């Protein structure tokens, strides 16, 4: 079975990993309490493959059973087993110093020896999961259930089982009727464009119009871009990275004065997240609509407008 075929399987029963220490082997599995009814979602892994992982929202109960097994005929001495629910923010330029904004711990097994498979139920009720899972350019926000078996002489056995968090929001109030802006080059170009609104849910449609009031340069084509800007760190150590998420050509060829071009851009096909503002004082994610015009000499003219994205359904 290929890596991608494995990734496509629903991970309600997490994959097994073997650990070896002092000649002893231990395997750990995790089964979530909801079993086959557990909600799931697909996310890209660090390696770029697609993983299907359990999905939770803020206030959910995270519960299930951990299965710990020694190799047949083996005895494993340990100093106890604990289960944690973790929410972490990791900045890629500061690896090794993850910030824990969720850290819940249960001691589930006292010191002793393991000679046969053990199934240990656990439950963390009404867990606060305030932020969505996020994988960005310089930062990631991740959640996991971590199972740790303490061993003598520092031979600790630990395994993490990732899960996703997505939270719906109440649609924000539309404070203004839409976006209206102008792009102009004196005596050469004058364009007005408007969009119906500035706040969109992730499956929404951007609807607008572009009006050409003065055209004295030879425009080759025009496009609308959605750009994501990720800001990490604080103060002088803030890093800003931008990437183009979507590019939609709205016109090919030279327009004439008085022409009107409609814009209709569907958001659902693109890999978008909600707008994040100052997540735990670690990072922010903003989105922008860019109107880009390219002339026959490949000079680019653009106008940028910030928009707000939100999730209204899972």
Image (cartoon, rainbow, N blue to C red):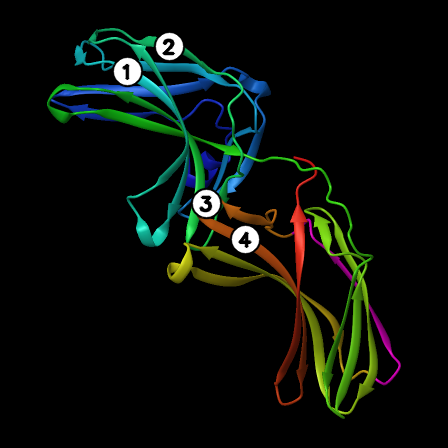
Q: Position of residue 288 (x, y in %)?
A: 63, 61
Of the residues under marks 1 and 2, which one precedes in the sequence? 1
Relative to 180, is 309 above or below?
A: above
Query: In the image, which is nearer the foreground, mark 1 or mark 3?
Result: 1
Of the residues under marks 2 and 4, which one precedes in the sequence? 2
Q: Are marks 3 and 4 in contact (CB under 8 Å)?
A: no
Question: Along the horizontal axis of the image, is 224 left or right of 36?
Answer: right
Q: What residue would you read off at disc 1?
A: 81
Q: What residue would you read off at disc 2?
A: 120
The CA distance from mark 3 to mark 2 is 31 Å
Q: Are marks 2 and 4 in contact (CB under 8 Å)?
A: no
Q: Residue at x 81, y 63 (%)?
A: 208
Q: What residue would you read off at disc 3?
A: 49
* Nearer the observer, 143 or 221: 143
- When asked about the image quadrant of residue 193, the answer is bottom right
Of the residues under marks 3 and 2, which one precedes in the sequence? 3
Of the residues under marks 1 and 3, which one precedes in the sequence? 3
Secondary element type, mark 2: strand
Q: Are marks 4 and 1 in contact (CB under 8 Å)?
A: no
Q: Position of residue 108 (x, y in %)?
A: 33, 11
The CA distance from mark 1 to mark 3 is 31 Å
The CA distance from mark 1 to mark 2 is 10 Å
Query: In the image, which is nearer the foreground, mark 4 or mark 1?
Result: 4
Q: Which residues are magenta?
A: 256-269
Question: Along the horizontal axis of the image, is 38 left or right of 46?
Answer: right
Q: How many other residues sit within 10 Å of disc 2, few (<14), some (14-19) or many (≥20)?
A: some
What's the mark number on residue 121? Answer: none
Of the residues under marks 3 and 4, which one precedes in the sequence? 3
Is residue 283 highlighted in magenta? no
Relative to 212, is 42 above or below?
A: above
């Amino acid at each position: 079975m290929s890596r991608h075929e494995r990734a496509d399987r629903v991970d309600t029963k997490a994959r097994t990993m073997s650990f070896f220490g002092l000649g002893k082997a231990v395997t750990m599995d995790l089964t979530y309490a909801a079993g086959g009814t557990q909600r799931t979602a697909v996310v890209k892994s660090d390696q770029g493959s697609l993983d299907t992982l359990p999905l939770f929202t803020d206030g959910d109960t995270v519960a299930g059973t951990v299965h710990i097994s020694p190799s047949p005929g083996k005895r494993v001495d340990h100093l106890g087993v604990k289960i944690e629910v973790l929410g972490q923010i990791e900045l890629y330029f500061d690896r090794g110093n993850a910030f824990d904004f969720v850290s819940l711990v249960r001691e589930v097994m006292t010191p002793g020896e393991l000679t046969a498979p053990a199934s240990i139920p656990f439950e963390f009720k009404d867990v606060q999961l305030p932020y969505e899972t996020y994988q960005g350019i310089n930062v990631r926000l991740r959640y996991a259930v971590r199972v740790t078996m303490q061993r003598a002489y520092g031979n600790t056995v630990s395994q993490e089982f990732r899960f996703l968090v997505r939270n719906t929001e109440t649609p924000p109030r539309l404070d203004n009727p839409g976006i209206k802006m102008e792009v102009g080059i004196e005596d050469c170009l004058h364009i007005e464009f408007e969009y119906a609104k500035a706040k969109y849910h992730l499956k929404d449609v951007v609807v607008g119009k572009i009006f050409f009031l003065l055209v004295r340069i030879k425009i080759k084509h025009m496009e609308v871009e959605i750009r994501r800007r990720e800001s990490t760190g604080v103060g002088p150590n803030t890093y800003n990275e931008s990437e183009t998420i979507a590019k939609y050509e709205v016109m090919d060829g030279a327009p004439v004065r008085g022409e009107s071009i409609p814009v209709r851009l569907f958001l659902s096909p693109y890999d978008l997240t909600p707008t994040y503002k100052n997540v735990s004082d670690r990072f922010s994610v903003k989105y922008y609509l860019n109107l880009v015009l390219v002339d026959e000499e490949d000079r680019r003219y653009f106008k940028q407008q910030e928009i707000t994205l939100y999730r209204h359904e899972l």
